[in-house]
């Protein structure tokens, strides 16, 4: 490539053209790169086999909560990471939060606009929304997840930056 550049420069290019050519050549290795592809949605196997789940559609309307979910009026306020952990999206577009601090539990947060995904620290904003449908899931011996009642402490950690 340097031979081509020097040959072009010797053929009477202006200084401005030479500089632009050098910039373009410097950027060539970057042009073929693309942003990492987003993670595939997590597919949770629930222990309870309820027909309707958050994200399903009934009568042309989207279901935003289900059995076992606690609905909280966020009114545009944020939901926070209750622990250091990881935020992923499930196939119904709900945020699934996991943490090594509570390895037998997952937290499902539905209703957040533009949720933050990936590694998060305790107190980081996970997203904002009008209402939050929150569910706590506990891992069962057979590998499925059962929805259980969330504790007030976990909800408080999710609703306030501590």
Image (cartoon, rainbow, N blue to C red):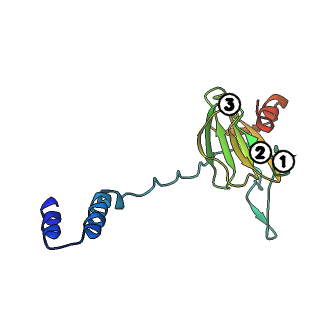
Is 98 on the left-hand or right-hand side of 148? left
Percent position of residue 57, x then y: 76, 64
Is 26 on the left-hand or right-hand side of 39? left
Residue 26 position by quadrant? bottom left
**Which residue is at the far front?**
15
Precedes in sequence: disc 2 or disc 3 = 2
Percent position of residue 13, x then y: 21, 72
In this picture, is 87 found above or below 114? above
Under tag 2, what secondary structure? strand
Under tag 3, what secondary structure? loop
The tag on residue 133 is none
Residue 142 visible in the picture = no
Residue 86 position by quadrant? top right
Precedes in sequence: disc 3 or disc 1 = 1
CB-based contact (under 8 Å), mark 2 and mark 3: no
Residue 52 visible in the picture = yes
Percent position of residue 88, x then y: 61, 46
Quarter of the image where the N terminus is located? bottom left
Is 96 on the left-hand or right-hand side of 132? left
CB-based contact (under 8 Å), mark 2 and mark 1: yes
At x 14%, y 73%, the residue is 11
Residue 161 position by quadrant? top right
- Of residues 31 and 18, the one nearer the viewer is 18
**Residue at which label 3 appears:** 83
**Residue at which label 2 appears:** 78
Instruction: Measure the alpha-carbon separation of dots 2 and 1.
Output: 7 Å
**Residue at which label 1 appears:** 74
Quarter of the image where the C terminus is located? top right
């Amino acid at each position: 490539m340097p031979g081509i550049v020097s040959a072009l420069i010797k053929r009477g290019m202006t200084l401005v053209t030479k500089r632009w050519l050098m910039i373009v050549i410097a950027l060539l290795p970057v042009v073929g790169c693309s942003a990492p592809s987003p993670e595939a949605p997590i597919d949770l196997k629930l222990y309870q086999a309820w027909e309707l789940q958050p994200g399903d559609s009934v009568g042309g309307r989207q279901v935003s909560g289900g059995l076992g979910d606690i609905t909280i009026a966020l009114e545009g306020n944020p939901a926070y990471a209750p622990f250091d952990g990881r935020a992923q999206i499930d196939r119904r577009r709900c945020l699934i939060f996991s943490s090594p601090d509570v390895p037998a539990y997952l937290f499902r947060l539905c209703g957040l606009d533009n949720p933050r995904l990936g590694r998060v620290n305790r107190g980081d904003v996970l997203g904002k929304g009008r209402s939050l449908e929150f569910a706590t899931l506990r891992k069962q011996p057979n590998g499925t997840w059962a929805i259980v009642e969330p504790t007030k402490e976990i909800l408080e950690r999710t609703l306030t930056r501590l």
